[in-house]
């Protein structure tokens, strides 16, 4: 075999090798892209307001709340960071979501099974809790009261001990009743829930 033929063979092998590595790289990148989360609720893992969830079953109805949980961190929350008498996302980042697989009776109102945004209007002594159909929105940027499904006026419950991180709980009392509780800083509210069927 001549030097010229050896050189051509060596170049051919290198070209094939490089091409196959590029294909491999593309496959790896494509595979990594499949596992990347593009959802609107995606929050960096080092966020100061991590995305979390609260859930429970009331009978056969699964109630699930998905929310971002900011902390007090020495700040004045209500009447400071969170204004009184204005619609609030009840968390941070994307809208707080509530979903249930069967119709649910919330404070005496039947709400059809589905997924909703949960907004609030904090008052000095009260809360207005809102269920809205537009659950895919950033904060209250696209809040539209025409899309409200229901509103409830609730008494504020003052906490004896400060709740550092915003918390929702879905509590099953028994097969036929339960409640949703919100707690943050020195304030709280509770929504009574029962199966609608």
Image (spheres, rainbow, N blue to C red):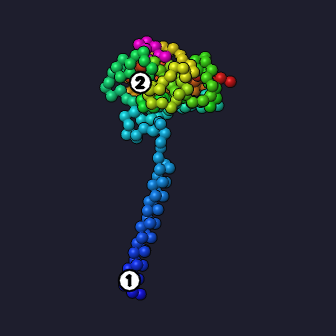
Image location of residue 93, percent across then percent down: 42, 31
Q: Is residue 126 magenta?
A: yes
Image location of residue 163, percent across then percent down: 40, 25
Q: Residues within 10 Å of mark 2 (few under 14, many from 20)?
A: many
Which quadrant is the N terminus positioned in?
A: bottom left
Report the magenta residues as a range: 122-128
Q: Report the residue marked by disc 2.
A: 184
Q: Report the residue marked by disc 1.
A: 4
Q: Residues within 10 Å of mark 1 (few under 14, many from 20)?
A: few
| Left-right relation of 123 to 196 | left
Pair 2/1: label in front: 1
Q: Is residue 133 above or below residue 51?
A: above
Residue 105, which numbered label?
A: none
Name the one closer to the observer, 104 or 95. 95
3D distance between C-alphas at marks 2 and 1: 78 Å
The quadrant where residue 138 appears: top left
Which quadrant is the C terminus positioned in?
A: top right
Determine the residue positioned at 47% across, 43% down.
37
Determine the residue positioned at 36% across, 17% down.
79
Name the one closer to the observer, 136 or 15. 15
As helix, strand or loop, the secondary structure at mark 2 comes to strand
Name the one closer to the observer, 66 or 195. 66
């Amino acid at each position: 075999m001549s030097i010229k033929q050896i050189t051509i063979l060596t170049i051919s092998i290198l070209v094939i090798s490089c091409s196959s590595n590029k294909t491999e790289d593309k496959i790896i990148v494509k595979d990594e892209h499949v596992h990347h989360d593009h959802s609107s609720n995606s929050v960096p893992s080092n966020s100061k307001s991590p995305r979390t969830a609260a859930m429970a079953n009331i009978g056969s109805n699964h109630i699930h709340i998905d929310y971002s949980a900011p902390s007090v961190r020495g700040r004045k929350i209500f009447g400071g960071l969170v204004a009184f008498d204005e619609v609030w996302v009840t968390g941070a980042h994307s809208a707080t979501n509530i979903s249930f697989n069967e119709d649910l009776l919330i404070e005496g109102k039947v709400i059809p099974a589905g997924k909703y945004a949960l907004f609030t209007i904090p008052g000095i002594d009260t809360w207005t809790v809102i269920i809205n159909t537009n659950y895919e929105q950033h904060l209250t940027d696209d809040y539209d009261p025409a899309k409200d499904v229901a509103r409830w006026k609730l008494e504020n419950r003052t906490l004896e001990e400060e709740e550092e991180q915003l918390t929702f709980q879905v509590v099953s009392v028994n097969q036929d009743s339960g409640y949703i509780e919100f707690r943050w800083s020195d304030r709280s509210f509770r929504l009574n829930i029962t199966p609608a069927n």
